Image: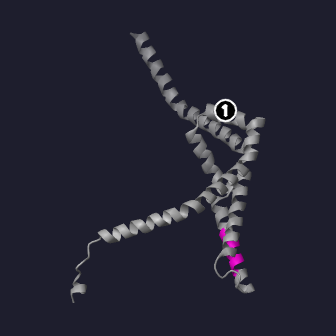
Amino acid sequence: MRTKKNLMQRWVVVLVLALAVAPCVAHADEASKRAKVEELVSVMHMDRMMDQMMEAVKGQTEQMMQQQPGADSMTPEQKKIVTDYQAKAMQIVIDSMGWKAMEPQFVTLYAQNFTEDEIDGMVTFYKSPTGQAVLNKMPQLMSSAMQLTQSRMVDVQPKLKALMEDEAKQMAATTPKSSSPAAKN
């Protein structure tokens, strides 16, 4: 009887210890996983990619501002106002969406969506010459893909406009004429 009681007490102690240690092990596993994700984003040069993306956004914004109606007829004072606005707007975007602001969220996203084995595999791949080639060529590839998409939109826009106009005509033709009280007076 005493042996059974001792055995039960030991199991209770083991169970309590296991429950007490489990969160520590889970936290250590999570910290290990986050460290691996941090290595992955470093190997992938995500900071550099985000900087390049911000520069592209800045360039596109400047180009849009120069192409807006009346841009050529602005006074130097108005041009300075626009330039100051662009700089302030870009700083807001960088502060909110730059790598320093986004890195913790990216690490969390990768940690939530990939297993440690998958992260290890990606680190191995991106450390390889092939992985580095992918990383180095991807910005140009994405830029070319974006240009291709935009050029296709030039062809698509008139078709979409015609489709919208046709839909508007059909809707107008099927809309019953209302007999509002204002129309009766």
* The magenta stretch spans residue 15: no
Q: Position of residue 21 (x, y in %)?
A: 55, 30
Colour treatment of the image: one colour
Bin the neighbour count of mark 1 within 10 Å (Cα to Cα): few under 14, some 14-19, many 20 and up: few
Q: Residue at horizontal 59%, vertical 45%?
A: 108
Compare residues 83 and 149 and report the one nearer the observer. Answer: 149
Compare residues 111 and 44 and report the one nearer the observer. Answer: 44
Magenta-drawn stretch, dominant element (helix, strand or loop): helix
Q: Residue furthest right?
A: 129
Instruction: Tell me the kind of residue under disc 1.
Output: Gly
Q: Position of residue 173 (x, y in %)?
A: 32, 70
Which quadrant holds the N terminus?
top left
Secondary structure under tag 1 reads helix
Compare residues 102 and 180 and report the one nearer the observer. Answer: 180
Asked where in the image residue 32 lies, by quadrant, the reply is top right
**145 to 162, vertically: above or below:** above
* The magenta stretch spans residue 88: yes
Q: Which residue is mark 1?
A: 121
Q: Quick check: 147 left or right of 23?
A: right
Q: Position of residue 20 (x, y in %)?
A: 52, 31
Which quadrant holds the C terminus?
bottom left
**32 to 182, vertically: above or below:** above
Q: Position of residue 115 (x, y in %)?
A: 58, 34
**84 to 48, vertically: above or below:** below
Q: Which residues are magenta?
A: 81-89
Q: Quick check: 127 left or right of 160?
A: right
Q: Residue at horizontal 75%, vertical 36%?
A: 130
